[in-house]
Image (cartoon, rainbow, N blue to C red):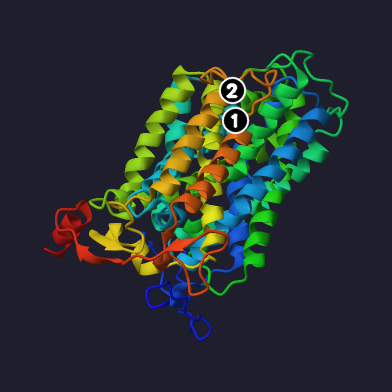
């Protein structure tokens, strides 16, 4: 019998509505995007990824291999390796949005349970705070450096606070307008930033030396451990998009071939080799300086310093908006009393306070390193579980059942045990903890087993391997109910007979109470 299996509808006869204007404030929350409103294409997904990452935030990550003591060509190798690994892990995460019509955190409810999907919400919050902060930090520092160079304005905590606040506020405004306005900003950022980075060839042709041999002192004492750490730092950039791809791909038609979605991510992230190499190359010019962006402004030809100021501002809007948008969207579903706009503003204010504390009172390098480590070790196993689940389930989802928690209901295909699927949850918790035990992102994250391989960071290998083994093992030992699979049944694993728990209203839930308040 297949009457209770997931039914995969046909999407061949969908008539699309007109694309909304960029200046219209997006009203949609985390609910399923109707098929008629799926007006985006895989090219839009590629563009928003490249635009969101083709900025000074990515440039800053590209400077880390040089700061850690690598030579220019060693740093280039670390960038290529880290970027390629990150792309491979990220590519499957673009598949969920077109299938489910919602973001990746809500889609993960199919594997973690409709309540257990808050894991994805937590990871998106962590990533958003980190990359929103980096984008505002770097964009603000570029403006401060330019004002100092061009107008003699002295650097000060007060000046930085004002400029951080200006960029942070504008990012929030962009995000409040929503997805279409973000696409417009990213189109501008893609062109402007690409031109800037390529003009660096002219600006620094007389000073850049590709034979730069490094500082002679590796951060972790040896080449290999430092090289691996550098590659992981770079890898964090594409991995950071894992929780957010569904925010944008949910506007793509469900019938879009997987190869185009894969291509969107491969191209969008692959092109970020441009800002990464810009960071590597220019870091050699200001090696030893405490403030990379400020020093670069002072080192640049005057005409290029002006361009740096303009494009750093645009880039801050691009990266900041792509990071903040998804978190505001998802926060509004976890805490239903907030609308998308209210949640965006709340998270933006919290992140801005973090920016001020982190930039003024703490070490920027250490703070970024810690956040990058946390993102790599906790988000990658979550993505691995999602990808395995997609393969096992043949990409079949019940859109309606994924929204149970958001509507203030219980039951449905993805209710499992009180809203949590312990197969995915235990696999993620265990793999994240194991990864952290082997991680080494000094000075904040230093796992007790970080030195077992001569200082080489094994956290990613441990996290990925344990997530895959534990999740597949759980599926084999504790088969999932047949109603979560399509008519063809599961791939590789078994299934068991079970009855779907009816969907009923949970009047005591926060979502139900919020809906009642809005109705009255």
On the rendered structure, is 178 left or right of 256?
A: left
Q: 306 or 288: which is nearer to us?
A: 288
Viewer-proximal residue, 93 or 134?
93
Measured from the top left, where is residue 230 in percent x and y?
Answer: 68, 29
The answer to whether 75 appears left or right of 237 in the picture is right
Q: Are marks 1 and 2 in contact (CB under 8 Å)?
A: yes
Is there any visible trace of residue 99 in the rendered image? yes
Q: Residue at x 48, y 84 (%)?
A: 15
Q: Quadrant of the C terminus?
A: bottom left
Where residue 299 sits in the image (x, y, percent)? 73, 25
Task: Look at the image and tell me in which quarter the N terminus lies.
Answer: bottom left
Front-most of 488 and 459? Answer: 488
| Residue at image point 62% right, 54% down | 91
> Would residue 301 be seen by someone viewing this image from the given angle?
no
Residues packed near mark 1 inside 10 Å, few (<14), some (14 to 19) or many (20 plus): many
Helix, strand or loop status at disc 1? helix
Q: Where's residue 196, x and y in %?
A: 71, 44
Asked where in the image residue 513 lies, by quadrant, the reply is: bottom left
Instruction: Say left or right for 124 vs 309.
Output: left
Q: Where is residue 450 drawn, in percent x and y?
A: 60, 20
Which residue in the structure is indicated by mark 2?
Answer: 440
Tag shown at residue 84: none
Q: Is residue 98 above or below residue 430?
A: below
Q: Which residue is mark 1?
A: 459
Q: Earlier in the sequence, mark 1 or mark 2?
A: 2
């Amino acid at each position: 019998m297949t009457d209770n299996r997931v039914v995969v509808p046909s999407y061949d006869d969908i008539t699309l509505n007109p694309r909304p204007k960029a200046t219209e404030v997006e009203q949609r929350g985390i609910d399923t995007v109707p098929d008629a409103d799926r007006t985006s294409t895989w090219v839009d997904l590629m563009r928003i990824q490249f635009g969101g990452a083709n900025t000074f935030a990515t440039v800053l990550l590209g400077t880390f291999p040089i700061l850690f003591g690598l030579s220019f060509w060693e740093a280039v190798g670390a960038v290529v390796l880290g970027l390629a690994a990150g792309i491979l892990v990220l590519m499957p995460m673009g598949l969920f949005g077109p299938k489910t019509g919602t973001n990746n955190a809500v889609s993960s409810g199919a594997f973690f349970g409709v309540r257990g999907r808050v894991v994805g919400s937590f990871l998106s919050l962590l990533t958003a705070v980190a990359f929103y902060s980096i984008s505002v930090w770097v964009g603000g520092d570029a403006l401060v450096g330019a004002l100092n160079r061009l107008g003699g304005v002295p650097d000060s905590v007060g000046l930085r606070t004002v400029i951080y606040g200006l960029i942070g506020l504008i990012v929030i405004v962009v995000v409040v307008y929503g997805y279409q306005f973000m696409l417009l900003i990213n189109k501008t950022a893609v062109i402007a930033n690409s031109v800037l980075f390529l003009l660096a060839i002219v600006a620094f042709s007389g000073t850049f030396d590709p034979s730069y041999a490094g500082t002679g002192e590796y951060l972790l004492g040896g080449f290999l451990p430092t090289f691996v750490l550098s590659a992981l730092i770079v890898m964090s950039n594409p991995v950071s998009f894992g929780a957010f791809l569904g925010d944008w791909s949910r506007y793509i038609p469900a019938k879009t071939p997987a190869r185009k979605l894969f291509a969107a991510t491969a191209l969008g992230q692959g092109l970020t080799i441009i800002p990464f190499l810009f960071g590597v190359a220019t870091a050699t010019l200001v090696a030893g300086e405490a403030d990379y962006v400020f020093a670069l402004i002072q080192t640049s030809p005057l005409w290029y310093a002006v361009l740096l100021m303009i494009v750093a501002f645009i880039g801050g809007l691009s990266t900041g908006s792509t990071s903040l948008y998804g978190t505001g969207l998802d926060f509004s579903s976890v805490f239903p009393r907030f609308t998308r706009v209210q949640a965006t503003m709340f998270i933006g204010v919290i992140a801005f306070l973090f920016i001020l504390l982190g930039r003024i009172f703490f070490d920027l390098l250490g703070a970024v390193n810690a956040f990058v480590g946390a993102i790599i070790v906790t988000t990658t196993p979550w993505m691995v579980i999602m990808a395995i689940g997609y393969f096992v389930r043949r990409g079949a989802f019940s859109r309606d059942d994924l929204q149970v928690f958001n509507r203030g209901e219980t039951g449905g295909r993805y209710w499992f045990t009180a809203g949590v699927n312990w197969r995915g949850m235990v696999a993620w918790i265990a793999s994240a903890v194991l990864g952290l035990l082997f991680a080494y992102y000094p000075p904040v994250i230093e796992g007790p087993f970080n030195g077992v391989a001569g200082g080489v960071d094994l956290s990613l290998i441990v996290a990925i391997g344990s997530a895959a083994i534990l999740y597949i093992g759980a599926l084999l030992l504790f088969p999932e109910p047949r109603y979560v699979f399509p008519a063809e049944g599961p791939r590789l694993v078994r299934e068991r007979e079970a009855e779907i728990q009816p969907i009923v209203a949970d009047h005591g839930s926060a979502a139900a109470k919020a809906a009642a308040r809005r109705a009255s």
